[in-house]
Amino acid sequence: EEIKSQVIPPRELEEIRLRMAEELDYPSRQRCAMLEEELEKQREDFFQMRRQLEKMKFERDQAAAEHEQSMFEASEKSRAVEAELSLRINALQIALEDTTEVDEMSALQREVQSAKIR
């Protein structure tokens, strides 16, 4: 009888075993939950950074396209100014030649007049 009273019934043994298993498993489950939470946070950070990277790439591409357009417009404007200045130079050269011819003609006429007077 005495031994019988010291022996724990199988049902109580099973309960003790389950409680011990839960107590031993609790830190593992807690750590697992903490790691899953950290993983989710890292995923969110990753996706946020990816979105930010895509936005920055888009802004860079847009700025590059605007710069290219600006450079093209400046180049076209420079060519137009160059063409206009070239036309003005040609017109001034023609005008200079005309005035030179007029001056030569005036000088020749004066010579003719002075020759007639003599």
Image: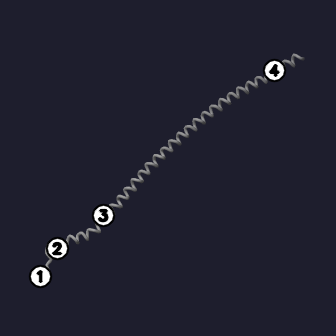
Question: SS for tag 4?
Answer: helix
* Left or right, residue 94 beside residue 117: left
Task: Identify the residue shown where x is 55% and y is 40%.
Answer: 70
Distance between the Cα atoms at labels 2 and 3?
A: 28 Å
Q: Earlier in the sequence, mark 1 or mark 3?
A: 1
From the top left corner, tell me how far across and down residue 63 is, in percent: 51, 44
Of circles 3 and 4, the one toward us is 3
**Which kind of residue does numbered mark 4 sit on?**
Leu
Q: Nearer the viewer, residue 43 or 19?
A: 19
- Residue at the far bottom: name it: 2
**Which kind of residue does numbered mark 1 sit on?**
Ile
Q: Is residue 42 above or below residue 24?
A: above
* Left or right, residue 85 beside residue 17: right
Question: SS for tag 1?
Answer: helix
From the top left corner, tell me how far across and down residue 17 is, in percent: 20, 72
* Left or right, residue 68 beside residue 23: right
Q: Is residue 66 above or below residue 115?
A: below
Q: Earlier in the sequence, mark 4 or mark 1?
A: 1
Task: Identify the residue shown where x is 30% and y is 66%.
Answer: 30
**Which kind of residue does numbered mark 3 sit on?**
Cys
Q: Earlier in the sequence, mark 2 or mark 3?
A: 2
- Residue at the far right: name it: 118
- Residue denoted by label 4: 108
Q: Is residue 41 above or below residue 3?
A: above
Q: Nearer the viewer, residue 1 or 75?
A: 1
